[in-house]
Amino acid sequence: MAATLSTLAYLVAAVLFILALRGLSHPTTSRRGNLYGMVGMGIAIVATLLRPGMGGGGIGLIILALAIGGGAGAYIASRIQMTALPQLVAAFHSLVGLSAVFVAAAAFYAPESFGIGHAGEIHGGSLVEMSLGLAIGAITFSGSVIAFAKLQALMSGAPITFKGQHWLNLGLGILLLVLVIAFVASGSAALFWLIAILAFALGFLLIIPIGGADMPVVVSMLNSYSGWAAAGIGFTLSNLLLIVTGALVGASGAILSYIMCKGMNRSIINVLLGGFGTDAGGAAAAGGGGGGERAPVKAGSPEDAAYIMKNAQKIIVVPGYGMAVAQAQQVLREMGDLLKKEGAQVEYAIHPVAGRMPGHMNVLLAEANVPYEDVKELEEINPEFAEADVAFVIGANDVTNPAAKTDKSSPIYGMPILDVERAKTVFFIKRGMASGYAGVDNELFFRPNTMMLFGDAKKVTQEIVQALQRD
Ligand code: NAP
């Protein structure tokens, strides 16, 4: 009876997780989606605690682990800056990978507790699940640690490449497969640990050549791997819900990676092989404004911007990473409201990889209560720039850089961009002439229809709001 109830509860939790994913696909339903996810997880935890065979001591340990893990998670989540979320996600993925390694080791050394045989006589199927969970978990762990270190600037974000790198990775991948087969045939402890070491090394080697603009895709791919690792643990533990949830995370992470690759006009294989933009990135970054015969940069004041926008009919706001750093979303919405009152049409253009995580700009604009109908995706808004009086670029850079269309040597070549330069006037709010995430110069700063508004995004926008209110 208890077993049936627990299975039923798992089914309900699985359905809630699916509804959560569905809800999270749109800003209007995302809160509800989150709620479904939390309720589903609550049900899953209670159902696990009530499963038959769960001794009192086991429950005590689980509750202790939940309190420590949940407490640490709640503490970190409440303190984390929005801009540091990608590295936090990478760090969390590394823990999922590591736990898959631990579960595999536990199952290998105490098979009786898992009901998968006896020491030295583990069922063949269980050895397959165990070794796959171990390999994927170890790759996820070390890969995520490198992604974390790169995003947190603990190591250089530039691709680290060397000759024959892809062949080495391919060779190690094949060797890993051979070791898995040999381990399944022999059940040898030495092979178990060889698989772990090789997979840790492979995770490290796979991520070091990936740099710059490709990191978001990698974090999403690691998310997918962590899901598959969890599904692997689910098989080892014979836990249906873990299999379903792991597969959901694995599949949704893979789909998100695909969507992001499409957004950047890259093939997933190309991203995963890494090393993208190695030379070009350095050269372009080193170029840093010294391009020789460039027109001088035209700098304006917040008053100038207010005056021009007051007389504009159509304004397209392009938010980017700098808006997130400055936390300028609230005052940006105030500016939009004032301009709307003046009779202007104000829309917000979202690039799929603006900011530092998928949906970064959507979340910030939603937090500031910008109406959803004013927020437009790249394909939808791009044709509108030609009719816009003003493109108001606030803390965005790479996502507007036309080098992505023309310069084959640029590390962002091929990424679709927001065509801001087609607007009559383009404002760029940024603190100086620094490049963006990909480390490349943006020639738009030197165009005749561009006016730079130098300063912190929040401060400059506040001054524009004051100027709009004064007149
Ligand atoms: P970006 O190219 O990184 O440019 C952001 C600009 O904001 C910088 O040039 C910086 O210039 C300015 N800035 C920084 N702090 C500011 C402040 N307080 N006030 C005003 N300006 C400030 O950003 P983006 O156009 O949003 O492009 C995103 C980039 O990140 C892409 O290359 C993308 O591939 C990459 N990426 C995306 C994700 C994702 O999932 N969305 C994840 C990781 C990486 P100053 O220093 O001169 O002020």
Image (spheres, rainbow, N blue to C red):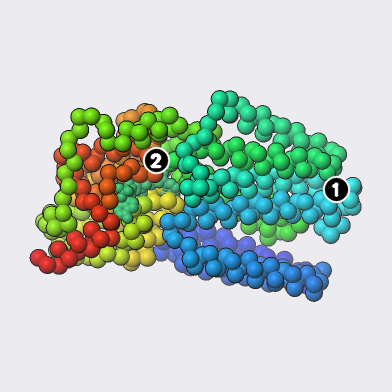
The nearer-to-camera label among 2 and 1 is 2
Which three-letter amino acid code belongs to the residue tagged 1? Answer: His
Which three-letter amino acid code belongs to the residue tagged 2? Answer: Ala
Q: Measuring from the top left, give residue 303's x and y in whole percent.
A: 13, 58
Towards the viewer: 373 or 64: 64
Q: Is mark 2 within 8 Å of ligand 1?
A: yes
Taking the image as shown, residue 262 lies to the left or right of residue 377, namely right
Residue 154 visible, this orientation: yes
**In the rendered structure, which disc, 2 or 1, sits on the residue that comes first in sequence?**
1
Image quarter of the N terminus: bottom right
Taking the image as shown, residue 288 lies to the left or right of residue 282, namely left
Residue 128, quarter of picture: top right
Circles 2 and 1, Cβ within 8 Å, touching? The answer is: no
Towards the viewer: 189 or 221: 189
The Cα–Cα distance between marks 2 and 1, rounded to whole angstroms, is: 49 Å
Rendered view: 211 above or below 63: above
Residue 123's disc is 1
Taking the image as shown, residue 4 lies to the left or right of residue 418, namely right
Q: Which residue is mark 2?
A: 438
Residue at horizontal 19 percent and vertical 50 percent from the top: 390
Residue 351 visible, this orientation: no
